[in-house]
Amino acid sequence: MSPKITTELLKQLRQVMKNPRYVQEPVQAYIVPSGDAHQSEYIAPCDCRRAFISGFDGSAGTAIVTEQHAAMWTDGRYFLQAAHQMDSNWTLMKMGLKDTPTQEDWLVSVLPEGSKVGVDPFIIPADQWKRMSKALRSAGHDLVPVKENLIDTIWTDCPQRPCKPLITLDLSYTGVSWRDKIVALRSKMAERKVMWFVVTALDEVAWLFNLRGSDVEYNPVFFAYAVIGMNTIRLFIDGDRMMEPAVREHLQLDSTLEPEFKIQVMPYGSILSELQAVGAGLSAKEKVWLSDKASYALTEAVPKAYRYLTPYTPICIAKAVKNAAETEGMRRAHIKDAVALCELFNWLEKEVPKGTVTEIVAADKAEEFRSQQKDFVELSFATISSTGPNGAIIHYKPVPETNRTLSVNEIYLLDSGAQYKDGTTDVTRTMHFGTPSAYEKECFTYVLKGHIAVSAAIFPNGTKGHLLDSFARSALWDCGLDYLHGTGHGVGSFLNVHEGPCGISYKTFADEPLEAGMIVSDEPGYYEDGSFGIRIENVVLVIPAETKYNFKNRGSLTFEPLTLVPIQTKMIDVNLLTEKECNWVNEYHQKCREVVGAELERQGRHEALRWLLRETEPLGRAQ
Amino acid sequence: MSPKITTELLKQLRQVMKNPRYVQEPVQAYIVPSGDAHQSEYIAPCDCRRAFISGFDGSAGTAIVTEQHAAMWTDGRYFLQAAHQMDSNWTLMKMGLKDTPTQEDWLVSVLPEGSKVGVDPFIIPADQWKRMSKALRSAGHDLVPVKENLIDTIWTDCPQRPCKPLITLDLSYTGVSWRDKIVALRSKMAERKVMWFVVTALDEVAWLFNLRGSDVEYNPVFFAYAVIGMNTIRLFIDGDRMMEPAVREHLQLDSTLEPEFKIQVMPYGSILSELQAVGAGLSAKEKVWLSDKASYALTEAVPKAYRYLTPYTPICIAKAVKNAAETEGMRRAHIKDAVALCELFNWLEKEVPKGTVTEIVAADKAEEFRSQQKDFVELSFATISSTGPNGAIIHYKPVPETNRTLSVNEIYLLDSGAQYKDGTTDVTRTMHFGTPSAYEKECFTYVLKGHIAVSAAIFPNGTKGHLLDSFARSALWDCGLDYLHGTGHGVGSFLNVHEGPCGISYKTFADEPLEAGMIVSDEPGYYEDGSFGIRIENVVLVIPAETKYNFKNRGSLTFEPLTLVPIQTKMIDVNLLTEKECNWVNEYHQKCREVVGAELERQGRHEALRWLLRETEPLGRAQ
């Protein structure tokens, strides 16, 4: 992969940074965050401004361009990728390493006195604005909102904002109607004494109305905002998709409804003026609830005294705890996903030795098998199909320039998932189609021990996921190894593959406690730069645990794996496993056999079934 | 223990809360924090205002009194104690439990509109002021500084502020001279571009000048502040103790010194006016460095634009990493401490069956044996000597009303430590002088497994202690058990037994990473209300670890126990230990034998030596 040449673009950007047509006063630095106006992690092509200006297209990163410098902050998953994709105009700032300056500290160190730093107020979250603004102010600089996005002014062939048809989800998928969700939301609002709630995250809008879309690749969401009052519902959305009879029926747009459930549909672009109107009409004690990650522009639309900001919205928290219909849907989706992967791995086992399977071919084949499954919609993220040294690029996506051929001599790492109408999947398996080295097996086994330590952990109700992160690392740490990413993230139900407010990561502290019904991933890894990558990932459901005692009647929790795909036993050094760990693997494989085996049988996929049966033979411990 | 009757006191306090002699306008609530003007954890009798008003004398707690209510916030260590010590005027707010409101939320829920909440600006840390003030303001109330402490106005027999002689420590104890510490501090100041540093914590003043005192029981500190400029040193301290020749010599007060090392001695009470003078004389870019936990009064003395606040001061961080002289001193102190405890446990074993040893007798005997050791100064905290149900009161201190007699039928928990001139100790052992039940052994063994999991943990350089907290709980969690306190705290070197910036606790996130030379405690426990308490505590030194691999050349760390006191093998259910855990116990006991055995021999304590040898027999695992 050759880096994007950005010399000309940066020159143009530096010109508009001084152009009075776009800025009231020249800005000496311009910040280009990753997100869109909804603070989405995955964004539409028209919102890929940071990738456009720098060439780096990983899912997380912030670019800052000054008159002299161009710098990119990203995390450990993307160090290699960013270094490959950016030209020498750019300095890579490796977040999480001790000597890497924060964006604020770096700006203060390079800016001339009394500088102005510009940013699009619709893109920067209010909490980031506040932190950045404070740090700059205390060093004599100013953070200023630049209404017209400066990247858009130089991006001549910027694609259009998507506006695709909507999918309606009935109760068999969602378990709860949108009306009941509105009722529950209003009761949370009443508890906190707020009168208005502004829904800014795309997955929260989708979840609330039991609608899905496809405006953003991999995330079944659509561009919209909502403002929920105690007696009103306003949905800000563009396009003729609201004219679709199924959507009108679903939202009861043409029915006679109690006024408090009547949805007013408004143009997407009118959110700011409508919110300003709401803000202007507030009387004492009428608060407006926003996420503290909502954009600075929308947050500012509500006078400060009326704002009620929280890190997690009540929708975010409600959405994370899956109900019975959602849990059952997730189970079904994971069984279908396992069927597709059994087919894939069986196929790879036969084809890889021929030397004709590249990373892209394997990724396409995985998609092909998944697409054969019922209710398949799309992939849930860009497939990470990586062999040998590419496996060490944590969020690698094969492109023709890097596309490597799978062989019997290298480790293959596949991190992939799909959106089914009944659930979202995300699974990583690391395979060897020849004979792994003792060192590869050793590292794989430490990662597996970490995976099991989390998956089998029992912990009290009220425990936050970040407290489990070290369990995943302990076996690696014992040998001086580690991995530079978190251990798990929340997973949506036919929604975003990454969602809050829970997760398993040493990096967070403010995560919400785990509770039964939440779904997270468990994905420790080990990466050796230039050689190989190993990751073992299951999606797991938080369930109540039976324990011998019950301290203070708090109750305990544990995890049930939803992912049911064999873990390659060839890669395991059985002598490094404890008896308990060995039993865990055998019981897990027994469940894969029973559950996925039955589905393979039902679908008449006999060859894949034979592969499954062979791959799930119990481990024999050396005595 | 019967509760303190506070009806009359609360009545008086509520009167002064409205008395124009003390408050400009009436305050509807008054906050009484735990601390003193230095935010000390352990405080002098004259500063025990919260205990005076409420009766609750645990080390942590905040009282808030309104016209109608009196409420006390404290943590899990003190739930039982606070409930016992307070009368029915008080509501106990159990911090850490889900339904307990924060102080701010509670105030907002009980205060009439537009209330004023008063607090002593010298006692409340600036960071707490900020948080509390913001929360109150957003609910329409005001936090106001009340200069005269309202408790002092009703505390007619309040004791005098202590002013005891100082101890000077030479290089053999400190490893670094006070001049070199000043040089290092100024270099940290230069790095951050600050011109002044205000030392507000008592242990930081003591450490910086290599002086110790005894103004506060258990903590070898003295009441003082210091203000360090790039060319000046001001020490604010009262009494004729600065006339002592040894002190004058140590601080070179009468020598001809370079001006930048000349110490100006000023009255303790003049800190505020001197700091205001410094603040008033600042020119652009001249910053003043303060801890963000410094009092609101001192923080306000520096104009906001000139303040540089950090959660941990450079002294706090430097002090935490012990040098070779300090580490060797800590080792010596722990060997002497172990000698005293071997004597004690040998004595208890003989005396307990006679039925004559009470908790207080045992605590006194422990102090007696410790006081026989070289360089003994005082205890490092109030001895927790507790048997049977008293053991479940986590920070119990025996008093005549609760004093229980040790017996062969109950578990005995002793958490105790001492200040020696060469180091500070803190050790907990849980013993049974008869035959423990299977359940008691089971619980003890889970706690031991947690203790070993931390002590033997290997983790990368840069790891924060809070990431190790779950290791201590895992075995307990597996059975549905837990304990409601952190796992470890930093320990000073002949200084405070609790010190920052490191520790091992799920409650913190902002702790500084562990590094070689830091010293912390490792003290998981299990407490069954009304029955017994178990805790196993060693003080451990962070040391480099040898590992098989060395990921990204980060290096690894582990712990070396400094405490060398046998762990009662009678309490261990060996079948619950892994082979690795069993080996850990045997190796630990072997080291106790060798190191403490040699010292017992040297001191001619032959009976205690025989006890040690018997108690350190290797565990035999049932096959």
Image (tube, coloured by chain):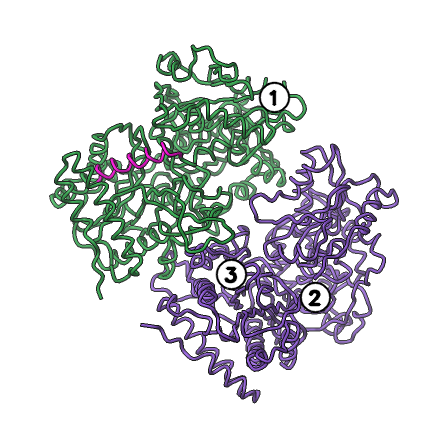
Chain colours: A purple, B green
Mark 1, mark 3: which one is toward the viewer?
Answer: 3
Residue occupied by mark 1: B279
For the image, the number of numbered tags is 3
Chain where mark 1 sits: B
Q: Amino acid at mark 2?
A: Glu
| Residue B359 shown left or right of residue A234 in the figure | left
Percent across and percent down for residue B379 are 29, 32
Q: Which quadrant of the view contains residue A619?
A: bottom left
The answer to whether the residue labelled 1 contacts the one labelled 3, judged by CB atoms less than 8 Å apart, is no
Q: Quadrant of the N terminus of chain A?
A: bottom right
Residue occupied by mark 2: A401
Query: Could you confirm whether marks 1 and 3 are on the same chain?
Result: no
Q: Which mark is residue A526?
A: 3
Q: Which of the pair A365/B549 is nearer the observer?
A: B549
Q: Looking at the image, can residue A286 be seen?
A: no
Q: Which mark is residue B500?
A: none
Magenta region: which residues?
A: B323-341
CA gap, disc 2 and disc 1: 61 Å
Magenta segment includes A236 = no
Type of secondary structure dominating the magenta stretch: helix
Residue in the image at 57% along x and 73% along y: A330
Q: Looking at the image, can residue A177 be seen?
A: yes
Residue in the image at 31% along x and 28% along y: B421
Percent across and percent down for residue A277 are 79, 50
Mark 2, mark 1: which one is toward the viewer?
Answer: 2
